[in-house]
Image (tube, helix red, strand yellow):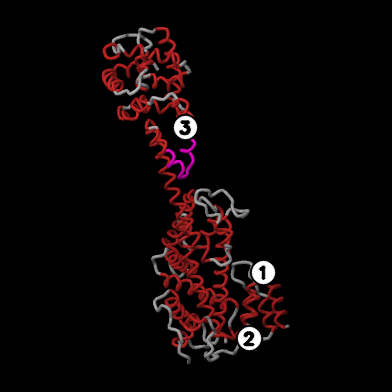
């Protein structure tokens, strides 16, 4: 600690002096206000701190770098961290200086190690870049700030951690009220840019989920729209037990699976439909357009095939049967039947026997039995 | 034949494109399949034809959707490489390099999938299911996946409608 402090002191003394001189000249209020912040940290009585600060003020310009007080290094460090206290470390007050040294040592550790509360002050004042921030820090006249600041810091910390728009607004508001918080606002903005990006992403996802909800039939929109609160993805609203996202995704997955199953089913029907029929493209297109636009079956179609009245009924049975996505061998038996009435039920059953699994076979036989009826 | 009372909504739409391509492919399948297959069709041949029809449906849908969509590209790629692998297994092609290439690509896909897992905030487990359902979904983050799913559902619905109308057309 000391060697570093010494080096710091040695290198930056001149710059520090000038810097701190300017600071002090620009002070609206006496430096005790800066002491206030430190007293809050150091646990010193305010008056004592004010005394200590006031006393070194006078020998400010010339006498700072001269004294070879061993305790000074601490305070130069602290002076890097806090404008007034470098002068408090003056040799005139050895005893309180010693006291300060203890506190300063402790506080340096605490300052440099962890808590965000304390960090900002060395941060704000050690860098010459943060002149403006340190000025207002010192310039706060009201004593009340001391009481206000720690809770505000805590609030800001909490809000900085909360990834919500509130944090950005409030940190910026706090920054406006208490300009010495600029660094903290910047840190908050750093986290807030992440939260902003996250929020934008979440909005994007929510918009797409809404689109999907409209596409997928059977999504209860009323119950689920309430869950699309952007800022509160974990909260449940409108009594949905599972989170809205999960339910909607389930619906989507089920819908996609059912559509894929329908495609398989229809492909089987088409494969079985007719080897003999010649596709009349024009008629098909006309039929397609008519059927698709009017959603009617083309009534003018010549029955190129033998009419299969049981197609609809069998289709429903297919749907019941289809619990799995794999190729449904039991269905093909019906297809065979569909496209060729002549095929007797016996042949249907005989075709079933080489089926893949016994369960399929049993299902096929069930269907065969049902069809007979 | 009746003239359609309403003109088709959009001649260049996915539906009409799909219809065209699909019917052409169906014709091809009809030609390739044995002529008198109604009575002599065995289980295996029938299943093969079903599979071919299904593949043709998906391929024509992917072509109709265009290559701008990730899922259509992924589906076409998958079909092409499945065909490759199929031929390799049957011993018609001797390109071992392609065989090694496709599992490599699949490995890459699974790696991407594991990496993307962090992106899935909500609907964690369900997003994986959805990725498996939607072709090419494994290599996407959640928002892209939702986008592709929406388009995929739209195309699937169209496909089902067209296929059903064709099947009804020929079964009536």
Q: As displayed, is residue A60 above or below residue A337?
A: above
Q: Residues within 10 Å of mark 2 (few under 14, many from 20)?
A: few
Q: Nearer the viewer, mark 1 or mark 2?
A: 2
Which circle's residue, 1 or 2, is located before the other in the chain? 2
Q: Which residues are magenta?
A: A153-171
Comparing A347 with B26, the one in front is B26
Q: As displayed, is residue A193 above or below residue A208?
A: above
Q: Is residue A154 magenta?
A: yes
User: Residue visible at 43% across and 83% down?
Assistant: B7
Helix, strand or loop for the magenta stretch, by majority: helix
Q: Which residue in the structure is indicated by mark 2?
A: A309
- Quadrant hosting residue A313: bottom right
Which circle's residue, 3 or 2, is located before the other in the chain? 3
Tell me, yes or no, whether the two marked residues, 3 and 2, touch with CB atoms within 8 Å: no
Q: Which residue in the structure is indicated by mark 1?
A: A357
* Label 1, label 3: how far apart the Cα atoms are: 71 Å
Residue A342 in sight here: yes
Residue B117: image location, x then y, percent: 50, 50
Comparing A115 with B51, the one in front is A115
- Whether residue A135 sits left or right of residue A310 in the image: it is left
Q: Which residue in the structure is indicated by mark 3?
A: A152
Q: Nearer the viewer, mark 1 or mark 3?
A: 3
* Label 1, label 2: how far apart the Cα atoms are: 29 Å
The image's mark for residue B85 is: none
Comparing B138 with A121, the one in front is A121
State which chain disc 2 sits on.
A
Residue A4 in sight here: no
């Amino acid at each position: 600690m000391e060697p570093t402090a010494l080096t710091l002191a040695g290198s930056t003394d001149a710059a520090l002096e000038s810097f701190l001189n300017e600071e002090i000249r620009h002070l609206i209020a006496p430096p005790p206000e800066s002491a206030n912040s430190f007293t809050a940290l150091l646990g010193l009585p305010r008056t004592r701190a004010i005394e200590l600060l006031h006393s070194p003020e006078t020998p400010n310009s010339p006498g700072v770098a001269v004294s070879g007080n061993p305790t000074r290094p601490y305070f130069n460090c602290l002076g890097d961290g806090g404008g007034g206290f470098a002068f408090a470390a003056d040799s005139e007050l050895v005893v309180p200086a010693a006291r300060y040294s203890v506190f300063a040592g402790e506080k340096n550790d605490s300052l440099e190690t962890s808590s965000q509360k304390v960090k900002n002050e060395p941060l704000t004042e050690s860098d010459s870049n943060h002149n403006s921030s340190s000025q207002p820090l010192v310039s706060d006249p009201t004593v009340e700030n001391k009481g206000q600041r720690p809770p505000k810091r805590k609030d800001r910390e909490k809000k900085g951690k909360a990834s919500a728009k509130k944090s950005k607004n409030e940190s910026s508001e706090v920054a406006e009220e208490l300009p010495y918080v600029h660094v903290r606002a910047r840190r908050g903005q750093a986290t807030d840019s992440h939260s902003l990006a996250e929020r934008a992403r979440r909005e994007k996802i929510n918009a797409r989920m809404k689109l999907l909800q409209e596409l997928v039939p059977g999504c209860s929109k009323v119950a689920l729209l309430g869950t699309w609160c952007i800022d509160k993805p974990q909260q449940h609203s409108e009594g949905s037990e599972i989170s809205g996202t999960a339910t909607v995704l389930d619906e989507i997955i089920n819908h996609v699976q059912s559509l894929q199953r329908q495609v398989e089913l229809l492909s089987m029907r088409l494969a079985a439909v007719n080897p003999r029929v010649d596709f009349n493209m024009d008629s098909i297109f006309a039929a397609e357009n008519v059927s698709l636009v009017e959603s009617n079956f083309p009534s003018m179609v010549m029955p190129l095939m033998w009419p299969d009245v049981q197609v609809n009924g069998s289709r429903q049975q297919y749907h019941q049967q289809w619990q799995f996505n794999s190729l449904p061998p039991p269905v093909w038996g019906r297809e065979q039947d569909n496209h060729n009435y002549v095929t007797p039920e016996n042949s249907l059953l005989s075709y079933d026997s080489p089926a893949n699994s016994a369960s399929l076979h049993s299902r096929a036989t069930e269907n065969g039995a049902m069809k007979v009826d | 034949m009746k003239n359609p009372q309403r003109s088709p909504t959009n001649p260049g739409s996915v539906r009409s494109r799909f219809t065209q391509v699909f019917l052409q492919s169906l014709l091809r399948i009809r030609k390739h399949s044995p002529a008198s297959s109604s009575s002599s069709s065995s289980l295996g041949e029938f299943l093969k034809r079903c599979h071919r029809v299904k593949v043709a449906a998906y391929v024509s849908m992917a072509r109709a959707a265009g290559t701008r969509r990730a899922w259509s590209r992924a589906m076409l790629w998958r079909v092409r490489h499945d065909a490759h692998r199929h031929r390799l297994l049957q011993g018609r092609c001797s390109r071992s390099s392609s065989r090694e290439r496709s599992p490599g690509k699949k490995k890459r896909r699974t790696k991407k999938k594991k990496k993307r897992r962090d992106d899935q905030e909500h609907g964690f487990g369900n997003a994986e299911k959805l990725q498996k359902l939607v072709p090419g979904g494994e290599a996407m983050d959640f928002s892209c996946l939702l986008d592709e799913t929406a388009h995929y559902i739209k195309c699937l619905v169209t496909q089902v409608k067209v296929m059903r109308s064709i099947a009804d057309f020929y079964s009536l």
